[in-house]
């Protein structure tokens, strides 16, 4: 039987039968039998090293183990590869199981959700509110040769931007209709840029011409016996707004009472009608007979009261 030696915990070598015993007998014959046991042990150690060195390195791996590709089973690596190789840490190592892992994961998730909510809140597009602010002024001219009425109507719109970013009013178009006939149009592009969280007023002027489609309007507006020459026109306004996310369009429609007999500068609220005027409480109170003036006290219009 041979002797098996283990190298690096996994290598085994087989010695030839009788080689170690023959060498020990040869050394004993030369040195005599008077040597102590310590010399025999040292010789035996040298014999073992020499015998092992004569055999190549053989590694026996079981079914449940593989050869380490880094150290080739020797248990050592070259010193020049120390900074190039990655150490293998057991899965059960405590360094891989920090105590606050769950806390860090929860905090990271909360921070990400909070950041997403803030970004969505500030960048979420909101609608731009457009309010018709009525007519600012009306300029009237007459073409006596062509029996036409020429008017310049200046209207205003109020824009309210509730977004946290600027909004561009890309276009503004308006058309004026009289008796379902278009008598004036206006088109504006790149009107204004509304700043974040602000309100802006935009004035625009529409040129109106009423003539061939309704020639009686000229005679009505120039009739001196009529004090107030009111006509009703319909204004249809379309506004397009755009921002970095989307575009939107608002359409407004209003009816206007216009005095075509003279120039006027006033503020007329949208959808203004006579029956919408406020009524004073005394106007709804029936008059008592004793409060009515006598017939002799009435004066003609324009007569000074004594």
Image: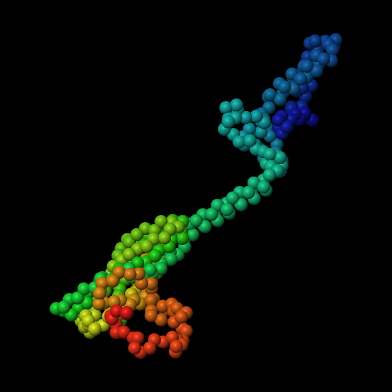
Q: Position of residue 145 (x, y in %)?
A: 14, 78
Residue 142, quarter of picture? bottom left
Comparing 63 with 274, the one in front is 274
Tell me the quadrant of the picture where the C terminus can be found: bottom left
The picture places residue 55, in percent across and down from the top left corner, at 68, 27
> What residue lies at 68% left-to-right and 24% top-to-bottom?
54
Where on the picture, by quarter, is residue 199?
Answer: bottom left
Does residue 266 appear left or right of residue 28 in this picture?
Answer: left
Q: Is residue 151 visible?
A: no
How many labels, in total?
A: 0
Whether residue 298 is visible to the viewer of this picture, yes or no, is: yes
Outermost residue toward the left?
A: 145
Give how far across and how far down residue 162 sits, in percent: 46, 60
On screen, residue 40 versus residue 118, left or right, reads right
For image coordinates 70% across by 43% down, the residue present is 99
Q: Which quarter of the rendering shows the N terminus?
A: top right
Q: Nearer the viewer, residue 120 or 256?
A: 256
Q: How is the image coloured?
A: rainbow
Place of residue 139 in the rendered image (x, y in percent of width and height, measured from the top left): 25, 71
Front-most of 94 and 216?
216
Q: Residue at x 38, y 69 (%)?
A: 132
Of residue 113 and residue 151, the one placed in the foreground of this image is: 151
> Left or right: 72 with respect to 151?
right
Residue drawn where x is 61% and y is 36% of the image: 86
Instruction: Please say if 100 is above or below 195.
Output: above
Residue 68 horizontal side relative to residue 240, left or right? right
């Amino acid at each position: 039987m041979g002797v098996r030696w283990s190298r690096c915990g996994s290598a085994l070598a087989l010695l030839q039968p009788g080689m170690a015993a023959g060498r020990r007998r040869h050394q004993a014959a030369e040195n005599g039998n008077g040597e102590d046991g310590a010399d025999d042990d040292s010789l035996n150690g040298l014999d073992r090293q020499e015998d092992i060195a004569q055999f190549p390195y053989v590694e026996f791996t079981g079914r449940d183990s593989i050869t380490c590709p880094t150290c080739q089973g020797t248990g050592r690596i070259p010193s020049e590869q120390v900074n190039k190789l990655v150490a293998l840490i057991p899965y059960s190592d405590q360094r891989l199981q920090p105590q606050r892992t769950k806390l860090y994961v929860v905090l990271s998730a909360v921070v990400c959700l909070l950041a997403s909510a803030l970004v969505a809140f500030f960048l979420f597009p909101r609608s731009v509110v457009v309010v018709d602010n009525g007519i600012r002024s009306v300029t009237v001219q007459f073409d006596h040769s062509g029996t036409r009425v020429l008017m310049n109507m200046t209207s205003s719109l109020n824009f309210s931007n509730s977004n946290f970013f600027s909004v561009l009013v890309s276009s503004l178009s308006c058309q004026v209709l009289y008796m379902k006939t278009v008598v004036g149009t206006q088109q504006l592009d790149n009107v204004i840029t509304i700043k974040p969280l602000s309100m802006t007023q935009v004035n625009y002027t529409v040129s109106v011409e009423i003539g061939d489609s309704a020639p009686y309007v000229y005679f009505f507006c120039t009739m001196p016996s009529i004090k107030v020459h009111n006509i009703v026109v319909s204004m249809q306004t379309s506004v397009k707004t755009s921002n970095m996310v989307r575009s939107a369009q608002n359409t407004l429609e209003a009816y206007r009472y216009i005095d075509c007999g003279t120039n006027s500068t006033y503020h007329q609220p949208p959808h203004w009608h006579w029956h919408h005027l406020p009524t004073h409480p005394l106007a709804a109170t029936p008059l008592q007979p004793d409060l009515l003036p006598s017939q002799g006290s009435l004066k003609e219009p324009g007569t000074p009261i004594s």
